[in-house]
Image: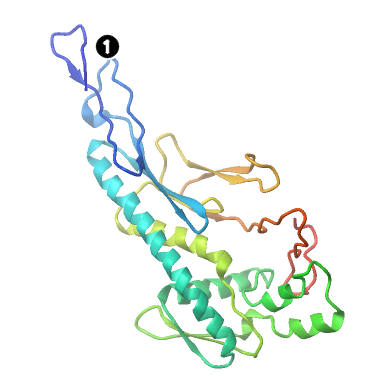
Amino acid sequence: MRVHCPEPRPRRSPGGWRRAALLLPVAALAACSSPRPPSAAEPQVVRATRSLFGATVAVSVTARDRGEVERAQRSVLAALGEARRVEDAMTAGGPLLAQVGRTAGRPVDLPEDLFRLTTHALRLAELTGGAYDPTAGPVRELYANGRAPAAAALHARLALVGAKQVRLTPRPPGFVGTVALGRAGMTLEVDPLWRPYAVDRAAAHLAQSGIADFLVDAGTAAAARGAAPRGAWRVGVADASREGAWAARLFLKDAGMAVAARPACPAAAACPPPVDPRTGVPAAGLD
């Protein structure tokens, strides 16, 4: 596209690029009175989205000049591909974790992603003092009908909860190994962590590819590095109680975030409350 100016020679405006599944901003035409050389073109964001983990995952990369646009296009698609690979690992990991519960006391081989994620889950349980616990399933099951369980039943189930009863054994040289549960009846669940883990792996892929400025946003989890064209990356956290409203707006730069959200529940259903794994009773102050 050319812009015809009063001067004898026309000047070429910064062009836009389009590719399937990419949303690229169209650069404004340069003013004839103050043309910019191509090297001084304003940065733009190359963005792609994909439906993963029951949400829209978006990858955005800042392209500083024309030469970076094609590289940015390849990078966002590759990062989404990495997130899709993690989603596939999640699907395959469900039966494996069910097997861990059925073979309590005997080690079960875990592939790399599931071993990494289980390691993160146990570390998170330690950092939160047990407020998060991947073995809390037996206690949560007692509240499935929306009513409080009997004291004796709760006491028996609490014996089946405790991240310290999970034994992870790495097997070099790769980041793989085995996992075993200390008691029959225990379960191991890491489902809430798959989406943040996918964001982390996609971000790591971008960083290892040499991308300096990017945002990976999956709604309840995001990771950012560098900056958007106009400063820090901006993300929103949806308000579950008000459709179309934001609970928070955050600015991220060289940072990440993840939000723990209670699953949606129909108004007429008897929905179980969020349970504190340390006590087995509903957690006060949580909605």
Given residues 132 and 107, the one toward you in this image is 107
Who's the residue at 33% across and 23% down the image? 28
Above or below, 9 relative to 266: above
Above or below, 269 relative to 89: above
Q: Identify the element where label 1 is drawn.
A: loop
Q: Is residue 103 at all visible to an observer of this figure?
A: yes
Who's the residue at 19% across and 18% down the image? 11
Given residues 279 and 2, the one toward you in this image is 2
Residue 163 occupies quadrant = bottom right
Above or below, 16 relative to 182: above
Using a 10 Å C-alpha cutoff, classify the residue at mark 1 as few (fewer than 14 neighbours), some (14 to 19) or many (20 or more).
few
What coloring was used for the rendering? rainbow
Q: Residue furthest bottom?
A: 106
Q: Residue furthest front?
A: 268
Say which quadrant the C terminus sits in. Answer: bottom right
- Horizontal and vertical percent for residue 92? 45, 74
Tally of numbered discs: 1
The answer to whether residue 265 is left or right of residue 149 is left
Q: Residue furthest top?
A: 6
The answer to whether residue 256 is left or right of residue 144 is left
Given residues 28 and 124, the one toward you in this image is 28
- Horizontal and vertical percent for residue 276? 74, 69
Amino acid residing under circle 1? Ser
- Horizontal and vertical percent for residue 138? 70, 78
Residue 279 occupies quadrant = bottom right
Who's the residue at 36% across and 33% down the image? 25
Say which quadrant the N terminus sits in. Answer: top left
The residue to which callout 1 is attached is 33
Q: Is residue 206 at all visible to an observer of this figure?
A: no
